[in-house]
Structures are given as C-alpha cells and as structure tokens.
Amino acid sequence: MIPPVKYFAGLLKNLPSRLVSLPAQASSPLSHLRLGLDEAWGLHEYVRWNVERKGRHKAVAERNQHRLRTLVFISMVEAFERFIKELAAVCVDALASRVVDDRLKALSIDPRSLAAHFGAGSLGRALTEGATWLEVDQTNTRFKKLLAEPREDGRFILFPIGKRDPDVWRGEALDLVFQLRHAVVHNAGVVTAFDAQKLAALIGAAAAPAGGRLTLERGDLWYLLSVLRDTGEWANERVAEEMQKVLTTIHKDAPASFDAGVVAADLAAKFGRSITIDGVKKP
C-alpha cells in the first residue's frame, strides 16, 4: 500500500542530512569555480553521449536535453556567483583585523549568518554568504570599498565600465547572463515582459517577444563555460594583485602588525598564485 503524501513530506526532513564533505578545491575560489563549471559541463556531455549512442526516440531525447541544458546553465552561473562570494570572503578575512576604517559596511550583515560562522572562524564567509552577488554594479561597489587603500575611498573597479576598456565586455556579458538566470530561476525559463525589456537594453537590440521560453543549444553552454572560466581567472588575478597592494601599504605603515610571509603564504594558497607583500614573496 502506498503511504499518504504526508508521509513523504516527513521524509523530506532528512534532506539537510544528505551532505558530503566539500572537495579539496573548495579552499581556493578559482579552483572551486573550475570544478563547478567542469562538473556542470560534464553532466551535459555524459547524458548527450549516452543518448546519441543509443540513437532512439530522438524527439523525446532532444526535449529532455533542452531541459537539462537549462539546469546546467543555472549550475554554471551559480558556480560563478559562489566564486565571487568566496573571493570577497578571502579579502575580508585578510583585511578585517588589519584596518580600522568602515570598508566592511559595503557588505550587508545578517546577524544570524554572522553568529553561525563564529565557530568556523571566518568573518569573510559570514559577511558574504548571506547576500546575492548577481549584479555587476553592486559587486563593483563592494569590491571598490573592500579593496580601498587605507584612508581612501577606493579606486578599484573589478569589472570595468568604461567603453574604451578592453575588458568592458566581461561585465556586459555577466549582466546578460544574470538577467537570463533570473528568468530561468524565477519564471521557469519564461521570458516575461520585464525580462524582455531588460534583455533588449542589455544586448542593444530587440529581444525575443515576451512569453517565450528560453531554449539553449549545446554550443550556448560551451560559450558560457568559456566566458565564465576565463573571466574567473581574470578576476582572480585582478583581486590578488590589488590585495598585494593594499596589504603592502598596511604593512609599510605598521610592520609589526602582521607577519607578511605568513599572510602571503595563506593568500598564495587561496588565490593559486604567488603573492608578494612588502617585498616578501610566497610561495
């Protein structure tokens, strides 16, 4: 006899216990991003290869693969958002105890999240994980304040906005991807009139009529994978370079405030590249 649906609802309470340990790559934002993108693409390719190998029910297979591509699209964008959060968390953890200004005000603080992270010893995660990072302008504002030189308002812009900057396309691409992600997550892929209006402004041309459902091809996922991977590596490099400058300034002002070698070694592991603070290079 099939139990009542209420019984299944009770079983859903077991879901929070279905956790596995984070992979080793989780200690480095960029490595974690690469893993997330590779896993999402690998899922798509595994299913595609097996469907094409059997070669049956082509119409049904294609319909289901379209749905799978939408889910893979979401996974890739979420992996990138997590990467940006983790980059910011690394910055907070390295700077919070070494500055006395108000740079952390750029991050929204959820008291419950803050309390939950006390045991983990990561103020950075407490200040970044509770917020969304799916708006380029907002992300720029946060990093500008976070990576400001001491006693300055900040000049660092993570995603360039000047039309003459050769990397301005990165922020523009992310704005587009984030808006498409909004349509997929909140409207099951249906492009509403609001979405269509915003998309038209982002691409500089008329978008598809409102009411249609987003349909992705295999090539679309490959383009997305390429852009997010390359932009992640580029952003990781930019943030690491800026962190070196800020920490060097702080160390020059107060050499006894922290061990440059220890901090540089820690950041080198997290950024996956060498870090130099006030002339001390690690690894």
Image (cartoon, grey):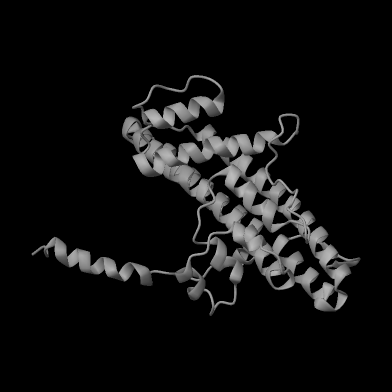
Task: Give the quarter of the figure containing the C terminus.
Answer: bottom right
Question: What number of labels is visible?
Answer: 0
Left or right of 13? Residue 114 is right
* Residue 17 visible, this angle: yes
The foreground one among 43 and 144 is 144
Q: Is residue 18 above or below residue 215?
A: below
Task: Give the quarter of the figure containing the N terminus.
Answer: bottom left
Q: Is residue 25 above or below residue 163?
A: below
The foreground one among 85 and 258 is 258
Q: Residue furthest left?
A: 1
Q: Residue at x 82, y 67 (%)?
A: 250
The foreground one among 3 and 47 is 3
Left or right of 67? Residue 41 is right
Left or right of 87? Residue 47 is left
Q: Residue at x 63, y 67 (%)?
A: 27
Q: Residue at x 80, y 65 (%)?
A: 247
**Residue 112 % position (x, y):** 45, 70
* Residue 222 visible, this angle: no
Q: Residue at x 61, y 67 (%)?
A: 124
Q: Residue furthest top?
A: 206
**Residue 49 % position (x, y):** 47, 41
Residue 267 in which image quadrant: bottom right
**Residue 206 % position (x, y):** 48, 19
Q: Is residue 210 above or below residue 187?
A: above
